[in-house]
């Protein structure tokens, strides 16, 4: 699986847009990029996933440049409740035909986002 | 819809004691995972299962055993607890389909805080 690098921590004021960038220089052609969010004392939660260009949902946007060697998670107008750890993962598609144990997702240390009032 | 439920939520053990952590999911997912999370370490995969009756080792399996007798349950056992096993344990489940457009999305439980004295 492709190695990812993301900042250890970030601070932001309420109401600002936050962009968290993840580097994945050795991403493979069939790899997807997925972001998870983890609040204190909870398990991670899927936020968004993409392959190229831009993906947007009700929570965030994901920007992926043409070379796909990095990706940026964008959180619009953050609030205190967005304080969490954000994980970037890069992995290929897994289907029912991938075979048992084809790969297993590994979470790095993530980016700890602190939103300041 | 309960999703992924872990029991117990907290437990304190003495060195050498044994215990079993239970994970139950009601989403009919094929894949189930056990992770541990330590401060500054991210999540590390202990064991996983790709279906009823099958289990496999993850990144840090030593000192743990697992069983998947029923599709909805995944048990993590500590035969002789050690202080190094003090951690927060997360269970997750996921599904995959046969279509190439589907990628894996993990659903996590709320965790079990285990302390070994």
Image: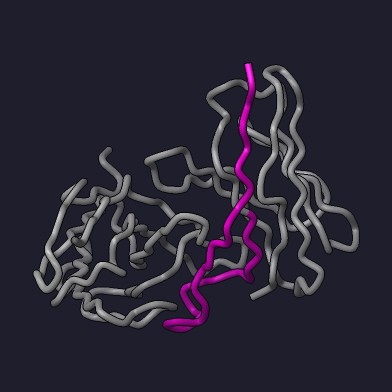
Q: Residue furthest right?
A: A66
**On-image quarter of the C terminus of chain A:** top right
Q: Position of residue A1 (x, y in %)?
A: 64, 75
Instruction: Identify whether B89 is placed above or below A47.
Output: below
Q: Residue at x 61, y 68 (%)?
A: B100
Instruction: Identify whether B82 is placed above or below A82.
Output: below
Answer with left or right where residue A17 lies relative to residue A95.
Answer: right
Instruction: Identify whether B22 is placed above or below A19.
Output: below
Q: Residue at x 12, y 63 (%)?
A: B14
Decide which of B65, B81 is in the foreground and name it.
B81
Decide which of A115, A34 is in the foreground and name it.
A115
Decide which of B104, B9 is in the foreground and name it.
B9
Q: Residue at x 25, y 79 (%)?
A: B63
Q: Position of residue A70 (x, y in %)?
A: 81, 58
Q: How many marks?
A: 0
Q: Is residue A95 magenta?
A: yes
- Magenta stretch, main secondary structure, is loop
Q: Position of residue B111 (x, y in %)?
A: 31, 49
Answer with left or right where residue B16 lies relative to residue B42.
Answer: left
Q: Position of residue A106 (x, y in %)?
A: 53, 67
Instruction: Identify whether A4 is placed above or below A82.
Output: below
Q: Quadrant of residue B12?
A: bottom left
Range shown magenta: A88-117
Q: Residue furthest front?
A: B117
Q: Residue at x 66, y 24 (%)?
A: A78
What colouring method underlies this structural image? one colour
Q: Is residue A82 magenta?
A: no
């Amino acid at each position: 699986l492709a190695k990812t690098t993301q900042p250890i921590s970030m601070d932001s004021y309420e109401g600002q847009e936050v962009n968290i960038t993840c580097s994945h220089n050795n991403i493979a052609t069939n790899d997807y990029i997925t972001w998870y969010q983890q609040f204190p004392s909870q398990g991670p939660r899927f936020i968004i996933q993409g392959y190229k260009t831009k993906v947007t949902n009700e929570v965030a946007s994901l920007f992926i440049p043409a070379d796909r060697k990095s990706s940026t998670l964008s959180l619009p107008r953050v609030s205190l409740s967005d304080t969490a750890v954000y994980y970037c993962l890069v992995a290929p598609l897994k289907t029912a035909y991938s075979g048992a144990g084809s790969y297993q997702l590994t979470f790095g240390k993530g980016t700890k986002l602190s939103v300041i009032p | 819809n309960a999703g992924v439920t872990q029991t117990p939520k907290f437990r304190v053990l003495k060195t050498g004691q044994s215990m079993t952590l239970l994970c139950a999911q009601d989403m009919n997912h094929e894949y189930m995972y056990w992770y541990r999370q330590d401060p500054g370490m991210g999540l590390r995969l202990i064991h996983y299962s790709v279906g009823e009756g099958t289990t496999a080792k993850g990144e840090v399996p030593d000192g743990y055993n697992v069983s998947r007798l029923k599709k909805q349950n995944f048990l993590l056992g500590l035969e002789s607890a050690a202080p190094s096993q003090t951690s927060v344990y997360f269970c997750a489940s996921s599904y995959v389909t046969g279509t190439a457009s589907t990628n894996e999305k993990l659903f996590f439980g709320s965790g079990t805080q285990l302390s070994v004295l």
